[in-house]
Image (spheres, grey):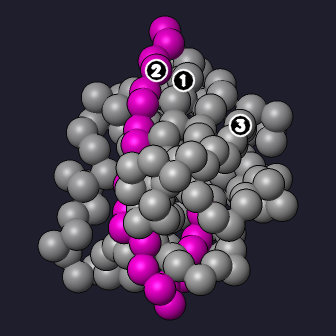
Amino acid sequence: MFRVGFGNDIHRLADGKPLILGGVLIESEKGAVGHSDADALTHAVTDAILGALALGDIGSHFSDKDERWKNADSFVFLRVAVGLMKEKGFKVVNVDSTISLETPKLRPFIDAMRENLANALEVEISCVSVKAKTGEKVDAVGKSEAIRAEAVIFLESI
């Protein structure tokens, strides 16, 4: 049996906040605002797993109203989702993701993000795709007001 899931996440950007994507701290004038560490990429991948398993979304498991998750490392969320996936008898075949951010350029950090995600998902790095796009000066992303991440995941039963 196979399952496909889609996840997405968007966060406002603000001066002086850290920018963490795929577990990588990226030097930037602006960072993402959120209850946890606001790692939009990891949130999108987590949401994709939960969606593939029909288990709701990241907010239903890790509410931003719950102080336990304040400033939490988003890989905690991802590891819980991977545990649920394994309990349900599935494994990751591959994940494809896209980060939309005007600046900074993310190319130097992509491989580290892929490696972090692959380790958490328990797959080879070749099974994890991370792409970066700009907003072409359009909408909140293009105006450097927000960051967006999207992910599609393909699961198969074990």
Task: Quarter of the image for the C terminus: give it.
Answer: top right
Q: Tell me which amino acid carries mark 1.
A: Leu
User: Residue 117 in the image: x percent, y percent?
Assistant: 66, 51
User: Residue 139 in the image: x percent, y percent?
Assistant: 39, 49
Which residue is found at the position 24% from the left and 55% from the top? 59
Which comes sooner in the sequence, label 1 or label 3? 3
Q: Tell me which amino acid carries mark 2.
A: Val
Q: Residue 38, which numbered label? A: none
Which residue is found at the position 63% from the left and 45% from the top? 133
Residue tagged 1: 155
User: Residue 48 in the image: x percent, y percent?
Assistant: 43, 36
What secondary structure prevails in the magenta region? strand
Tags 2 and 1 touching, CB below 8 Å: yes
Q: Is residue 10 magenta?
A: yes
Gap in angstroms between the C-alphas marked 1 and 3: 15 Å
Residue tagged 3: 129
Which residue is found at the position 83% from the left and 61% from the top? 108
